[in-house]
Amino acid sequence: MSSVKIECVVNENCKIGESPVWEEKESSLIYVDISGKKICRWNSFTKQVQSVSVDAPVSSVALRKSGDYVVTLGTRFAALKWKDQSVTTIVHVDKDKPNNRFNDGKVDPAGRFFAGTMAEEIRPAVLERHQGALYTLFPDHSVVKHFDQVDISNGLDWSLDHKTFFYIDSLSYSVDAFDYDLQTGKISNRRSMYKLEKEESIPDGMCIDTEGKLWVACYDGGRVIRLDPETGKRIQTVKLPVDKTTSCCFGGKDYSEMYVTSACQGMDDESFSRQPQAGGIFKITGLGVKGLPPHSFAG
């Protein structure tokens, strides 16, 4: 194993940092602060963070083929123009559930934007159960609901052969797999691939590496774990200096660096004094594996 190094590259205390995405053409990491209601972009050369503030919790961000970004904002899929700092609604979901909001989202290999919803939390991981659903925004801006009864729709990614969709509903404490049809975007045959152990706590965001292994950020577990979907076994644990690790992605010029977001919402002063970097963005190097460039929304 190469020697793993962890560095806090953005020491700003995001309330709920989430949805890290590497943007190659800007050599930047884009991410959101959900309850801070902003989309942020950290430039890996200048080390500066720019941000765009919005009027609702913003839970995920993705690149768009035509330039700029798509985001999930409240219960809306929306387009973000960075230079104008403008957000335009594409479509609204869960209109009958005013207490809901989107959570994690990601673009599939065909350029469709998958994202799921949840009830607004009373405090971290405490909420009205079974209120969420998983949706896909198609490039023609139509929307499909795959299923509902979700607690906290979270991490998602696709196998290297594009035949399996991996998905986390956090309060099931499970990483699930589905059969996935690249042509249609349909998913079927849900099964549990890995059940988290007690000290791993709550599964949150997720990404895949070029060896087809999954990396899952464990909220309240202070770690990312590497899983083998073939065997359903954990093969590596990397611990971070903060407990509320929320999501992860690969980035850097050859996608050999891992970026991990974190949260500080709900922490008391005593916890903060022990973990002053809570809510920061961390870079992990020396993992000895690489990730894949993110897909861009085709609409």
Image (spheres, rainbow, N blue to C red):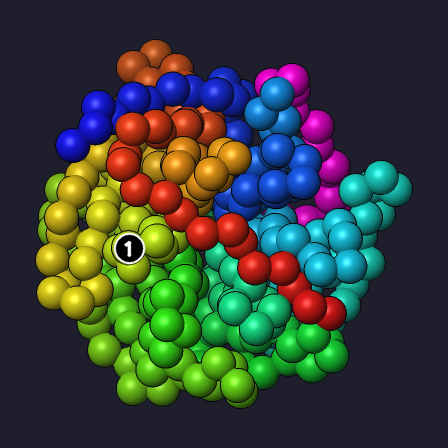
Q: Is residue 134 left or right of residue 205?
A: right
Residue drawn 74% across the image and 46% down it = 55
Query: What residue sits right under mark 1 in the picture?
Result: 211
Q: Is residue 277 left or right of residue 198?
A: right
Q: Is residue 58 visible?
A: yes
Q: Is residue 9 left or right of residue 220?
A: right
Sort mark 1 into few (<14), some (14-19) or many (20+) by Cα contacts within 10 Å: few
Residue drawn 16% across the image and 42% down it = 236
Residue 230 vs residue 202, the one in the foreground: 230
Extreme-top residue of the structure: 273
Q: Is residue 61 above or below residue 134?
A: above
Q: Position of residue 189 (x, y in %)?
A: 29, 86
Residue type pointed to by label 1? Glu
Q: Is residue 278 magenta?
A: no
Marks counted in the figure total 1
Q: Position of residue 291 (x, y in %)?
A: 40, 47
Residue drawn 27% across the image and 34% down it = 287
Q: Is residue 48 magenta?
A: yes
Q: Is residue 189 above or below residue 202?
A: below
Q: Position of residue 35 (x, y in %)?
A: 57, 41
Q: Is residue 233 left or right of residue 270?
A: left
- Mark 1 secondary-structure assignment: loop
Residue drawn 74% across the image and 79% down it = 140
Q: Is residue 194 visible?
A: no
Q: Which quadrant of the figure contains the C terminus?
A: bottom right
Q: Quadrant of residue 242?
A: top left
Q: Position of residue 172 (x, y in %)?
A: 25, 64
Q: Which quadrant of the figure contains the N terminus?
A: top left
Q: What span is in magenta?
A: 46-57
Extreme-front residue of the structure: 254
Residue 97 vs residue 82, the one in the foreground: 82
